[in-house]
Amino acid sequence: MSSITRRRWMLATVAMLLARPLGLVSALSGCASSDDEETDPILRVPVADVPTEGRIERKQGRVVVELRREDGEIRARSMLCSHQFCRVQWKPDENHYLCPCDDGLFAADGSVKYGRARRPLRDLEYRKMGDEIWIDTRQVYRLAPLPDDPTGTE
């Protein structure tokens, strides 16, 4: 019986912790637990739930999405800060979003007003499927171009 060194145990532990968010743990171990199961990335919201004025928030997995109407058009926006993915809060009295992690501020249009974030809040694309709006929440984690970089390269 071989003995595991402390170093090997630490490396294995770190590897497992890093693999877990990537969904590799269940693939490598050959089994899945309820924690490792993937959540359906598609958020489905009935069009009737989106108010004519104001905002609603819906959550799918770890992603929180804000839905609102502007000039009769439905708009969807991620409520995760573009800096560290902390959940931002809409402050209607101040007409801005606040990131509680670093006190960053985003304007009502999602642009950065103050803080460490370099990218605006992510506006999300959606599809209208019958009487529902379908939003692929995976787009929140795709790198968006910087506002002053129209080519999408940094």
Image (tube, rainbow, N blue to C red):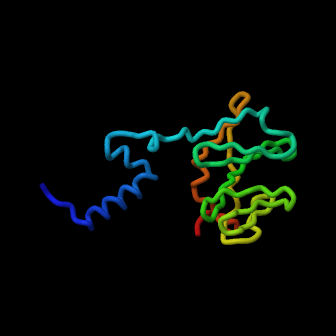
Farthest-out residue, top: 130
The N terminus sits in image quarter: bottom left
Q: Quadrant of residue 126?
A: top right
Question: Does 43 sit above or below residue 100?
Answer: above
Residue at horizontal 74%, vertical 62%? 98
Residue at horizontal 60%, vertical 63%? 84
Side of 86 where 107 appears, left or right: right
Q: Whole-percent x and y of residue 79?
A: 69, 53
Q: Whole-percent x and y of residue 28?
A: 32, 47
Q: Whole-percent x and y of residue 38?
A: 49, 41
Q: Quadrant of residue 2?
A: bottom left
Q: Nearer the viewer, residue 142 or 53?
A: 53
Q: Whole-percent x and y of residue 9?
A: 28, 61
Q: Nearer the viewer, residue 70 or 83?
A: 83
The C terminus sits in image quarter: bottom right
Side of 138 where 131 appears, left or right: right
